[in-house]
Amino acid sequence: MPKKVVPVEYQSRAPEQLRDLAHACADKIGPNGQTVLRDAAAEIEGSEEAYAALVSEIHVLREKLARTERNLQATLRLVPRSSSF
């Protein structure tokens, strides 16, 4: 499955801000602080990508459901009606 990308208008700006902060405050927070901020940024981006993949999968499943429902309706129209039911 290809990697799903969150449209730019829906992407959080927090990862970029966290990376900028890690760079700007490097002398104050040290390497460990920088790592924490960069890891947090990566977590946010990973969550966005996972959400995008779920939304994409939901669209695919809804399309399959609609197709299945259409096929079922077409099949039911082909089956003769019986009054014995």
Image (cartoon, rainbow, N blue to C red):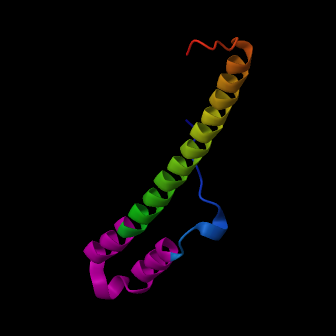
Q: Position of residue 71 (x, y in %)?
A: 68, 23
Q: Position of residue 33 (x, y in %)?
A: 29, 77
Quarter holding the N terminus? top right
29 sits left or right of 23 in the view: left
Q: Residue at x 70, y 11 (%)?
A: 80
Q: Which residues are magenta?
A: 14-39
Can residue 11 be seen here? The reply is yes
Task: Tell me, yes or no, whether the highlighted magenta stretch contains residue 23.
Answer: yes
The extreme left residue here reads 32
Placement of 73 over or under 35, stated as above or below = above
**Closest to the observer, 39 or 78:** 78
Can residue 3 be seen here? The reply is no
Q: Residue at x 26, y 73 (%)?
A: 32
Task: Tell me, yes or no, whether the highlighted magenta stretch contains residue 31.
Answer: yes
Placement of 48 over or under 20, stated as above or below = above
46 sits left or right of 75 in the view: left
| Number of numbered discs visible in the structure rendering | 0
In terms of secondary structure, what is the magenta stretch mainly? helix
Placement of 28 over or under 67, stated as above or below = below
Q: Position of residue 76 (x, y in %)?
A: 67, 19
Q: Position of residue 7 (x, y in %)?
A: 65, 61
**Closest to the observer, 5 or 41:** 5
